[in-house]
Amino acid sequence: MTLKEEFLALLEKDKEFRYAVVGLLGFEEILRRLDKHEEELVKLREDLNRLGGNMLLGFKRHDEELVKLREEMNKLREDMNKLREDMLRGFELMNRHLDALGARWG
């Protein structure tokens, strides 16, 4: 193995050696900052995944609540229609009674 090949292999495999070389070249601080940024990005991605999961649970809960509300609204609509029918029957009965009274008393 030539010196060049050995040097490149060390750069590729040995993180401390790589930092020592870039330190001599003046790039050590940049690499350290990039490593910190990468770590922060990993943490942010984990946070985002966790929040996304929580959001999905919240959406599911809201969907279930909407289904319940829709069912309750449909039940109320049925009740309202029955009341309207009862009221119309009551008006018809009252009209018949008034017509009968009018026919009887003129």
Image (cartoon, helix red, strand yellow):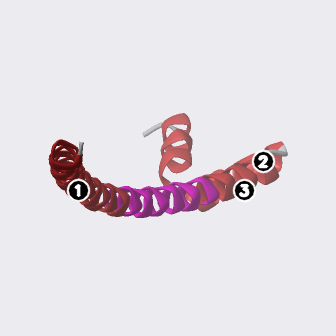
Residue type of the residue flagged with mark 1? Leu
Position of residue 71 measured from the top left corner of the image (x, y, whole percent): 22, 57
Residue type of the residue flagged with mark 2? Ile
Quadrant assignment for the C terminus: top left
Distance from label 2 to label 1 (Cα)? Answer: 77 Å
Residue 48, disc = none
Where does label 2 land, which residue? Answer: 30
Residue type of the residue flagged with mark 3? Arg
Is residue 81 among what the camera can see?
no
The part of the chain drawn in magenta is: 40-60
Instruction: Indicate whether residue 41 is drawn in magenta.
Output: yes
What residue is rendered at 16% in x and 48% in y?
Answer: 104
Residue 32, disc = 3
Left or right for 68, reference 19: left
Q: Are marks 2 and 3 in contact (CB under 8 Å)?
A: yes
* Closer-to-camera residue (69/22): 69
Where does label 1 land, which residue? Answer: 83
Left or right for 4, reference 89: right
- Mark before the other along the chain sequence, 1 or 3: 3
Q: Are marks 1 and 3 in contact (CB under 8 Å)?
A: no
Q: For numbered disc 3, what is the local secondary structure?
A: helix
